């Protein structure tokens, strides 16, 4: 899976979860043409974004062979600062990576409230949305290998 496919996978999982939580499909954007304008007027490319009313969640996907570094978190933080000033609701952000992350990246992410998760395969993928809904992606083998998503309640029981 290349970087674009990884972004598409994340986008599909998030889209399914957000739609199940009642977010309109057109509120979920992704890919190279997904731009979110900051107060500076600069249009930041964001891998996956979800607009839920006035709230905005930004997701950066890093399918890298090397660890996420502090500078990567700071780059996203710069985008957050610029975009937050133009967003009336809550703004949250996540970095999802296939590699590990350095301790400095984790320290900064924790301090600034940026979620930092390692997801190497589709089978490891879990997303939380609005702190109340979880979704897991599992590998299913039925006449071929394909991923299937399902919603899981906060208590871990199936929906």
Image (cartoon, rainbow, N blue to C red):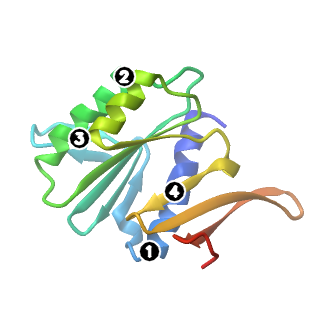
Residue topped by disc 4: 127
Name the foreground residue: 65 vs 110: 110
Q: Position of residue 3 (x, y in %)?
A: 56, 34
The image quadrant that residue 87 belongs to is bottom left
Q: Earlier in the sequence, mark 2 or mark 1?
A: 1
Measuring 17% from the left and 47% from the top, which residue is drawn there? Answer: 84
Q: Earlier in the sequence, mark 4 or mark 2?
A: 2
Q: Whole-Å distance between the Cαs marked 3 and 2?
A: 15 Å
Q: Whole-Å distance between the Cαs marked 1 and 4?
A: 12 Å
Q: Whole-Å distance between the Cαs marked 2 and 1?
A: 32 Å
Q: Which mark is residue 70?
A: 2
Q: Is residue 114 above or below residue 150?
A: above
Residue topped by disc 3: 80
Name the foreground residue: 97 vs 34: 97
Q: Position of residue 156 (x, y in %)?
A: 60, 69
Measuring 56% from the left and 32% from the top, which residue is drawn there? Answer: 63
Residue topped by disc 1: 21
Asked if the residue at tag 4 contacts the one at tag 3, i.e. Cβ–Cβ closer than 8 Å, the answer is: no
Name the foreground residue: 127 vs 144: 127
Asked if the residue at tag 1 contacts the one at tag 3, i.e. Cβ–Cβ closer than 8 Å, the answer is: no
Q: Earlier in the sequence, mark 3 or mark 1?
A: 1
């Amino acid at each position: 899976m290349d970087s674009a496919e990884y972004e598409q996978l994340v986008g599909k999982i998030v889209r399914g979860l957000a739609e199940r939580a009642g977010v309109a499909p057109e509120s979920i954007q992704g890919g190279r043409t997904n731009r979110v304008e900051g107060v500076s007027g600069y249009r930041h490319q964001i891998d996956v974004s979800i607009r839920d009313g006035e709230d905005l969640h930004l997701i950066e996907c890093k399918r890298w062979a090397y660890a996420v570094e502090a500078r990567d978190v700071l780059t996203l933080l710069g985008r957050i600062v610029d975009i937050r000033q133009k967003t009336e609701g809550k703004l949250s952000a996540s970095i999802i990576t296939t590699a590990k992350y350095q301790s400095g990246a984790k320290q900064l992410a924790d301090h600034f409230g940026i979620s930092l998760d390692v997801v190497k395969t589709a089978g490891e993928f879990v997303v939380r949305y609005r702190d109340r809904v979880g979704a897991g992606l599992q590998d299913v083998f039925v006449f071929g290998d394909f991923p299937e998503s399902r919603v899981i309640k906060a208590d871990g029981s199936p929906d």
